[in-house]
Image (tube, helix red, strand yellow):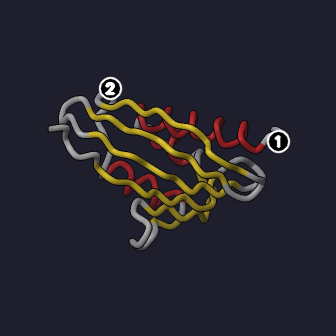
Amino acid sequence: MTADPIDRYNAWVERYKKAWASNEPGDISSLFSEDAGYLDEPYKQPWIGRESIVKEWLERKDTPGDWTFEYEVLAANDRVGFVRGTTRYKTSGKTYLNLWEVYLDTEGNARRFVEWYCEVPPAG
C-alpha cells in the first residue's frame, strides 16, 4: 500500500482511465471489490458487485478515443478520495464536470464509487 493516500487514488484513477479506454471486462472488474457499489448518478440505485458493474458499464460504454479526461485528486485519506475531473467528448462536442467519491479497500479496489456530474453549457 502506498503511504500517501493521494498517490493511491491517482493510481486508481489511472486504472479507471485504462478500463474506460479499453472497455475490457478484466480491466473494469479489476477496479472494484467483489461486492462494490457503483452509482453513475448519486441518487440512482447502485450497480452491486463486479459482474453487475461490468455489465452496466459495457451497456453504456464510451467509444475509445472519443473522449479526454483531465483530473485532480482533491482530497483523500485511507477511507475515501474525492476526484474532480473534466470529460470532453470529441464527436458530440459536449463537456462534463465530474466529482467522484471513491472509497478504496485495503487492496486498492473501490468498494463504492459515486459520480456527480453536470454538462457545461455551450459557449455563446
Dot 1 alpha-carbon crowd within 10 angstroms: few under 14, some 14 to 19, many 20 or more: few
Furthest toward the front, the residue is 124
Amino acid type assigned to the residue bearing label 1 in the image:
Met
Label drawn at residue 65: 2
Which residue is at a point 57% across and 33% down the rendered structure image? 14
Which of the 4 image quadrants contains residue 91?
A: top left
Which residue is at a point 71% across and 41% down the rendered structure image? 6
Q: Position of residue 28 (x, y in %)?
A: 50, 44
Say which residue label 1 marks. 1
Which residue is at a point 20% across and 34% down the rendered structure image? 93
Furthest toward the right, the residue is 3
Which of the 4 image quadrants contains residue 64?
A: top left
Judged left or right of residue 116, residue 72 is right
Look at the numbered disc 1 and give the secondary structure of its residue.
loop
Look at the numbered disc 2 and give the secondary structure of its residue.
loop
- Per the model, the C-alpha gap separating discs 1 and 2 is 31 Å
Amino acid type assigned to the residue bearing label 2 in the image:
Gly
Task: Tell me which numbered mark, 1 or 2, is placed earlier along the sequence.
Answer: 1
